Amino acid sequence: MYQYCFVEKRAIGSAQAEAFEYMFEVTSDRKQTYPVRVVLPRQVVLTWAESHLRPLADSEQYAAVKLRLFRAFDELDDMQSKGRELYIDGSFLEESLASLGVE
């Protein structure tokens, strides 16, 4: 079982932000924490907004990021060595938001 704490969100890349980076501190034993980075590319957010005819709210972006983190918890057998950097692509964004009823 993992526990996590959100640390920060920041734009990475150029002045227009090529992506958004969400940083979490994660632990599985409550003794040692390690950083996990979830990257949400700006183009993925823009493509979603174009296809849904509205911008994606910050809270909706964060929800998709958390779902990506949770999926890694479920799928990776060693999060500390294999899950330190996670990415969200267009299909995951669409799937995760649809599962939450976001249209």
Image (tube, helix red, strand yellow):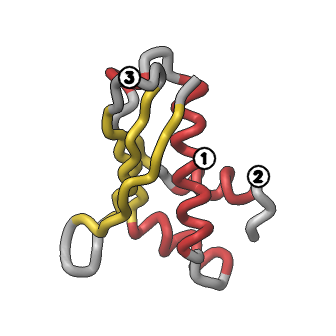
Closer to the N terminus: mark 2 or mark 1?
1
Local secondary structure at mark 1: helix
Query: What residue is shown with label 2?
Result: 99
Circles 2 and 1: CB distance less than 8 Å? Answer: yes
Residue neighbourhood size for the residue with mark 1, other residues' Cα within 10 Å, grouped as few (<14), some (14–19), many (≥20): some
Q: Earlier in the sequence, mark 1 or mark 3?
A: 3
Q: Secondary structure at mark 2?
A: helix
What residue is disc 3 on?
31
Query: For the residue labelled by badge 3, is the local secondary structure a helix, a strand or a loop?
Result: loop
Say which label, 2 or 3, has the lower sequence index: 3
Where residue 15 appears, as percent x and y from the top left, is: 20, 80
Residue located at (41% from left, 68% from top): 43
Q: Residue 34: x, y in percent?
A: 32, 33
Nearer mark to the viewer, of 2 and 1: 1
Going by the numbered disc 2, the residue's amino acid type is: Ser
Please give left or right for residue 101 compared with residue 50 in the image: right
Q: Kindly identify the residue that appears in the image at 38 percent across and 54 percent down.
A: 7
* x and y, in percent, of residue 50 in the image: 58, 79
- Residue 86 in percent (x, y) is at 40, 41
Is 28 displayed left or right of 57 in the figure? Answer: left
* Amino acid type of the residue tagged 1 in the rendering: Leu
